[in-house]
Image (cartoon, rainbow, N blue to C red):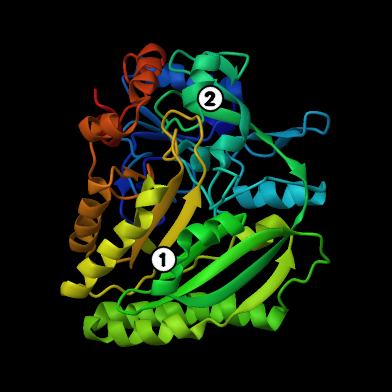
Amino acid sequence: MTETYARTATSPWRNWAGTVTARPARTVSPASVDELAEALRRASEDGLRVKPVGTGHSFTATAATDGLLIRPDLLTGIREIDRKAMTVTVEAGTPLKRLNTALAREGLSLTNMGDIMEQTVAGATSTGTHGTGRDSASISAQIRALELVTADGTVMRCSETENADVFAVARIGLGALGVITAITFAVEPVFLLTAREEPMSFDQVTTEFDQLVAENEHFEFYWFPHTGNCNTKRNNRSAGPAAPPGKVSAWIEDELLSNGVFQVACALGRAVPATIPSIASISSRALSARTYTDIPYKVFTSPRRVRFVEMEYALPREAAVEALREVRAMVDRSPLRISFPVEVRTAPADDIALSTASGRESAYIAVHLYRGTPYQGYFTAVERIMTAHGGRPHWGKINTRDAAYLSGVYPRFGEFTAVRDRLDPDRLFGNDYLRRVLGD
């Protein structure tokens, strides 16, 4: 037993947003798959439940445990790049930002990604992290194989040809099936994206939504509550040349306005809610139109230093505009004061059992509030609208849904729970959150 593995701790664990605190009995950082398997066997013998944790960017208690908390800090790095198969196999604890920069040095890239790079690859995929795309789906949909350590310490390799029934559900597994130790992603030669960001009115973007999605490989927009203003972003592949934003202009847009000034505005709005509509009107006009061209991760991702809480629902794409208009009407007639913009993205249908886009073309509506702001009233009202349209909540973001509801909106829900029953009948990887969303 190495000293690394033997390291334990009992200090509380908190997620990034401060919405979840866990007090594990033990915390370990295994340095190998064998050490991880041994940790699972010991936890089982001691009657401790087990949860792996990433960087804590989930807003739900997906990773919370009072038993054994597994930190993946030492399970990092690229195992193999296969240029013939065009795949990369990476250790589960590797942060996305390290994977993206390492792939770029090798002249490679993921096809699509979300806008935050802080998560570990296992944490991001296990909760269904996604970006926006007309044809390209979530990070989980880019998985070609994964390595999973199950409750009895078995190391299981899963792909379309090996343990295919597990692979069909484990790409978004919520940490309920075992501990992922490595993931093989499809990659492609690095390419350029041209980003076009520009303001647009709420009425125009909702009226032209289908056209904007159809005409762009990646389209998203942000609506600023209490205004009729939106900011849109279109990312499309480009032949080049690269034309990244200048250092000064990038700092002004991405750091000063999107983080520094926005932080002050959110703090003021939390202290004096009556100022929020005026702040929103100013904020929605602060970001100017710009166009730039760069490699994918430098276009898809951006720094997020203002901490917030978030709820996001995936809807059938054809329901998105109606639902967003209902959210706007609800905000307008309520006493709510909302300082954060509402984000709208899309995804094609995929074949992962618990993917929010499983079997249907989807649109995502995400609502946020500044950390420390009471969010229950706003989120409850939005959730009521989303569920009326058959919405599926993001697994890592705040929601109140339970297994009874979720089994009705996921046609393959029973397929997932059947694999869970087989791999973890004693619920070694269970916790209160999984009991709510998956059932006993």
| Residue 408 x %, y % | 26, 31
Residue in view at x 37 percent, y 40 percent: 10
Amino acid at pointer 1: Thr
| Residue 78 x %, y % | 72, 37
Label 1: which secondary element: helix
| Residue 420 x %, y % | 38, 19
Amino acid at pointer 2: Leu
Return the residue nearer the eye: 68 or 317.
Answer: 317
- Residue 306 in view of the camera: no
Height in image: 124 above or below 7? below
* Residue 217: assigned label: none
Quadrant showing the N terminus: top right
- Residue 156 in view of the camera: yes
Quadrant showing the C terminus: top left
Local crowd size for mark 1, using a 10 Å CA cut-off: few (<14), some (14–19), many (≥20): some
Return the residue nearer the eye: 128 or 133.
Answer: 133
According to the picture, the residue beneath numbered tag 2 turns out to be: 36
